[in-house]
Image (cartoon, helix red, strand yellow):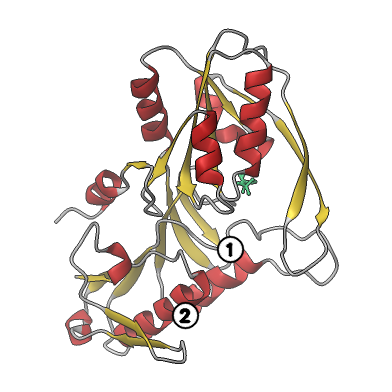
Amino acid sequence: MRFVCPSFSDLCQPNVEIKKFPDGDSYVRVPSAADAAGKDVVLFNRLYPEQDSAIFQTLLVVRALREHNPKSITLVAPYLPYSRQDKLFKEGELKSAEILCGLLKREGVGLLVTFDCHFLKKEGEFEYGGLKIKNLSLNRRLVEKAREIAGEELEIMSPDEGANYLVAEYGGSSMKKERGEYAEGGEAYREIKEVKMEKDVSGKAVLIIDDMISTGGTMLRGIENVKKGGAKSVICAAAHGFFLKGSLEKLREAGEVFVSDSIPTEVSEVSIKPLLEEMFPE
Ligand code: R5P
């Protein structure tokens, strides 16, 4: 039994209504919620963009389903917002990732299926914040696509040590990234102080791969490094692409760039569909 939100309309026909009231509150209706009774149900909803609304809407849809006592509820959310907030740096901060997972669990989500979750760093089944999570990875498909584009052997690198798990199986290496403190003002952003690269890439075709491209700052510094190091070409790829602050244009000027459609973008060249079809055959 499937319930599909409009954010998944590129992959399946939506059967859940999600709208906004004029004041911005969310309106949610699940016309066939009663069909969930006694069934294993799967809810497909992308939780980005407008993640705070999307999360609340998800909780409402889950409640609408739970009212009819399904056997189980699995949520498929290709990119998990707040997944980068899993560590505490300063007094009074919160592990928002853990809180989100706890909320989903408490509302009735039995399993979350997601892709390349930032705090899990490998494929498999986990429990986090009390929530069972199945983490799928797009990494192999991203590397295959990059090899297809390059048409030659690639030196595979990640732009910071946190993404080393993505390159390890290819014998790749990682750059070392250091961030500064949060900047003054209303935006929670820690400037990148430096991204160091030790690998000799001179004359090589390089793939830089990360779990996500957000403001593009990390990737752009990585590209700068490999260019300074004499690489002959550079491709950059990630599972999730937000491309904030005009970074898509800057990245395109620097080399090839592509991501998956976990978040649909104009450079989403790898689809999450085959992995979802494998997991949820018709
Ligand atoms: C960080 O640990 C992640 O793996 C990415 O490197 C980071 O989130 C990318 O952010 P940005 O594109 O803003 O540099």
Q: Is residue 223 left or right of residue 92?
A: left
Where residue 249 sits: x, y (%)?
A: 51, 42
Q: Residue furthest top?
A: 203
Whether the residue under disc 2 has CB within 8 Å of ligand 1: no
Residues 260 and 23: in front is 23
Q: Residues within 10 Å of mark 2 (few under 14, many from 20)?
A: some
| Image quadrant where one finds the C terminus | bottom left
Q: Is residue 252 left or right of residue 76?
A: right
Q: Is residue 17 above or below residue 268?
A: below
Residue 45, image quadrant: bottom left
Q: Which residue is found at the position 24% from the left and 63% from the top?
A: 9
* Residue 43 appears anywhere in the view: no
Residues 165 and 266: in front is 266
Q: Considering the numbered disc 2 on the image, is that residue within a helix, a strand or a loop?
A: helix
Q: Which residue is found at the position 33% from the left and 22% from the top?
A: 148
Distance between mark 1 and mark 2 Cα atoms: 14 Å
- Dot 1 or dot 2: first in sequence order is 2
Q: Which residue is found at the position 56% from the left and 71% from the top?
A: 100
Number of callouts: 2
Q: Is residue 52 left or right of residue 183?
A: left
> Which amino acid type is marked by label 1?
Tyr
Where residue 88 sits: x, y (%)?
A: 77, 61
Q: Is residue 21 above or below residue 121?
A: below
Q: Considering the numbered disc 1 on the image, is that residue within a helix, a strand or a loop?
A: loop
> Which amino acid type is marked by label 2?
Phe
Q: Which residue is found at the position 49% from the left and 60% from the top?
A: 80
Residue 82: assigned label: 1
Residue 56: assigned label: 2
| Image quadrant where one finds the N terminus | bottom left
Residue 196: assigned label: none
Where residue 157 sits: x, y (%)?
A: 58, 25
